Image: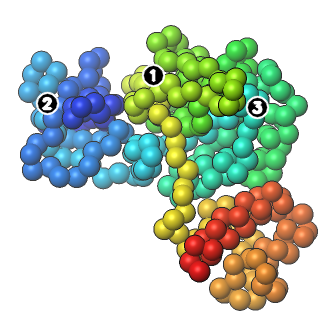
Amino acid sequence: MATGRVIKNYNGYYYVDIGETELVECRRRGKLKEKILVGDKLDITELGDHKGVIEKALPRRNAIRRPAVANIDQMFIIMAAQSPDPNQFLIDKMLMTCEYGGIRPKLCFNKCDLAMAAAESYRDFYSRCGYDVYLLSAKTGQGIAELRALLDHTMSAFAGPSGVGKSSLLACITGRDDLQVGAVSNKIKRGRHTTRHSEILRLDSDTYVVDTPGFSSLDFEDFEAKDILPLMPDLAVHGGQCRFSSCLHRSEPDCSVKQALASGLILPERYETYCKIVDSILERKR
């Protein structure tokens, strides 16, 4: 019996890293019913010639649904400083998705060579919200060494909309030139999707990077309005002292969150994101 990590899943075959040079191609044993995700740790029986059968999936530390990846130590949310311009509402929702999954996010702005002033403005904004922010350029190499050092001894996922240079950053970090890199459409100013399947890139014996085919932020369909504040730590730290325990921090009197907003302790754009999501939930339930 050997224990390993699923590196990729393709056509019903699971390719498992057990610490050897070559991956073990595994099929699941018939009695195994649970869904297996990229990143899952498994007990397998080796059959020889780098073939094996999955005996058991080990408990997960965390998981995200889209892309379906498990046991992530940290998530790097990649945005471009320009081309395409960042969408702050999307950034906020992606940060909230990480908070919901129990994954600490790190926010990166690539293409800083195109718009350094804008990148610094976004860094200052999200640093005030309590997030770690990094300014990068796959073209010039800015910040790449620092980013690579953050990956050591972890399994890290890279997420972001198409066209922000995610694959270019991964190529810089891994030294691989076989990662697909897409261009930004001049017509719609969005990137064309290039990555097709979630796959873990092994940098060394205990350092992995997940290359994802697109990261879907929370749609909040199954959420209650009260569930939203805890997903925004910079707002949540000011909650819990309102007059009403059921306070949704919108129109209620004596609201500690609104008081923090008025005092400048909460950034208006973040509160606007909170209100937009809460209002959409309340509207749906009418």
* Of the two numbered discs 3 and 2 in the rendering, the one whose residue sits closer to the viewer: 3
Numbered mark located on residue 203 in the image: 1
The residue tagged with tag 3: helix, strand or loop?
Answer: loop
Name the residue at 9% across, 22% down: 48
Residue on which disc 2 sits: 52
In the displayed structure, would residue 107 be above or below residue 83?
Answer: below
Residue on which disc 3 sits: 81
The residue tagged with tag 2: helix, strand or loop?
Answer: strand
Q: Is residue 92 visible?
A: yes
User: Distance between the Cα atoms at labels 2 and 1?
Assistant: 23 Å
Name the residue at 45% across, 46% down: 66
Specify which label sits upstream in the sequence, 1 or 3: 3
Query: Badge 2: how crowded within 10 Å, few (<14), some, or many (20+)?
Result: many
Amino acid at circle 1: Leu
The residue tagged with tag 1: helix, strand or loop?
Answer: strand
Residue 137: image quadrant is: top right
Amino acid at circle 3: Ala
Location of residue 67 in the rendering, given as x and y in whole percent from the top left corner: 44, 42
Specify which label sits upstream in the sequence, 3 or 2: 2
Amino acid at circle 2: Gly
Query: Badge 1: how crowded within 10 Å, few (<14), some, or many (20+)?
Result: some
| Relative depth, front residue between 151 and 261 | 261
Location of residue 217 in the rendering, given as x and y in whole percent from the top left corner: 55, 50
Asked if the residues shown at circle 1 and circle 3 are in contact, with their CB atoms under 8 angstroms apart, the answer is no
Specify which label sits upstream in the sequence, 2 or 1: 2
Name the residue at 14% across, 30% down: 52
Q: Is residue 207 visible?
A: no
